[in-house]
């Protein structure tokens, strides 16, 4: 009987394709989709970074950082939208900067009487894809050219370039106004008059830094306060059924 010499056997790693696919799937799930509106801008930023790097390496690194920011700006992550009759969901990512009663823009045709208005300000670091705040038919879309003052100011609702929607719902008409900001120079609309949109569906995008105002019918109860961080398609802003009482808030 012969024995194999000690040490001639080696453990050969066996590749596990399932494990490799599992890792790739995990990475793919963590990657946030980019909205097609951003492809041209991302490409332009990348080319600019290459040119700056060719001129001077430190400028190239600055260009690379700006390119990464551009990719981040045009992200379009999926959202989990609450579904309940009467809920008004945020149309934009950002911070609630104004709550009160204001007359809606005249081009919307909602009358001159003040309506409950909730405004969400989007910085250049927020996702800028806007979503339908309610289920309803888009009865009107109205664009109005204007200025480009800081969208965080109240007068931006009157003076700035804007694009407005009027949604017909079972609880009354809801106005949604995309407002250009100090840096924003382009409002993109994804919807048409007469279309029916479900709450949370994409209706537009603003480049770069702006605000969205929502005008609500009488009886709507705000569910947020000034400074609330809102997420488009996810954060309830108000209840049009009046089933929720006004909420108290604590900062901490």
Image (cartoon, rainbow, N blue to C red):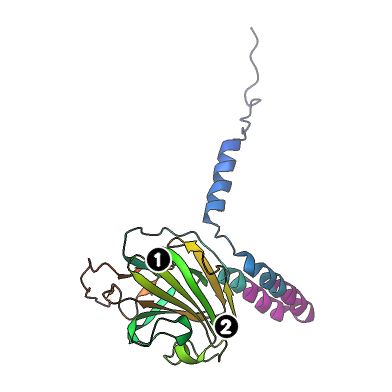
Foreground: disc 2 or disc 1: 1
Q: Which mark is residue 184?
A: 2
Q: In the picture provided, is 61 more to the left or to the right than 220? A: right
Q: Quadrant of the N terminus?
A: top right
Q: Is residue 211 magenta?
A: no
**Pointer 1 local density, CA inside 10 Å: few below 14, some 14–19, many at least 20:** many
**Residue 149 image position (x, y, % from top left):** 52, 92
Q: Which mark is residue 43?
A: none
**Pointer 2 local density, CA inside 10 Å: few below 14, some 14–19, many at least 20:** many
- State which tag comes first along the sequence, 2 or 1: 1
> Dots 2 and 1: beta carbons under 8 Å?
no
Q: Residue at x 39, y 72 (%)?
A: 230
Residue named by callout 1: 134
Residue 125 appears in the picture as rendered: no
Front residue (pair 35, 134): 134
Provide the residue span drawn in magenta: 46-67
Q: Is residue 153 above or below residue 247?
A: below
Mark 1: secondary structure: loop
What secondary structure prevails in the magenta region?
Answer: helix
Q: In the picture provided, is 82 more to the left or to the right than 206? A: left
Q: Residue at x 67, y 67 (%)?
A: 39
Q: In the picture provided, is 167 more to the left or to the right than 189? A: left
Q: Is residue 58 magenta?
A: yes
């Amino acid at each position: 009987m012969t024995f194999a010499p000690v040490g001639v056997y080696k453990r050969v790693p066996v590749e596990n394709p399932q494990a490799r696919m599992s890792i790739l799937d995990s990475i793919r799930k963590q990657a946030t989709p980019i909205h097609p509106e951003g492809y041209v801008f991302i490409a332009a930023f990348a080319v600019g970074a290459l040119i700056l790097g060719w001129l001077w390496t430190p400028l190239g690194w600055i260009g690379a950082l700006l390119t990464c920011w551009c990719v981040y700006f045009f992200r379009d992550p999926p959202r989990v939208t609450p579904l309940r009759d009467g809920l008004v969901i945020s149309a934009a990512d950002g911070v609630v900067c104004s709550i009160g009663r204001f007359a809606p823009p005249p081009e919307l045709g909602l009358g001159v009487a003040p309506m409950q208005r909730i405004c969400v300000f989007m910085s250049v670091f927020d996702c800028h894809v806007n979503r339908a705040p309610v289920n309803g038919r888009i009865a009107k879309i109205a664009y109005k050219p204007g200025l480009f003052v800081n969208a965080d100011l109240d007068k931006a609702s009157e003076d700035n370039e804007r694009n407005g929607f009027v949604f017909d719902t079972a609880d009354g008409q809801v106005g949604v106004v995309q407002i250009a900001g100090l840096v924003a120079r382009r409002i993109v609309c994804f919807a048409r008059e007469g279309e029916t949109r479900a709450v949370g569906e994409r209706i537009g995008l603003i480049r770069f830094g702006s605000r969205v105002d929502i005008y609500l019918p009488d009886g709507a109860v705000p569910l947020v306060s000034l400074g609330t961080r809102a997420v488009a398609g996810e954060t309830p802003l108000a209840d049009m059924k009046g089933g929720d009482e006004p909420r108290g808030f604590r900062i901490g």
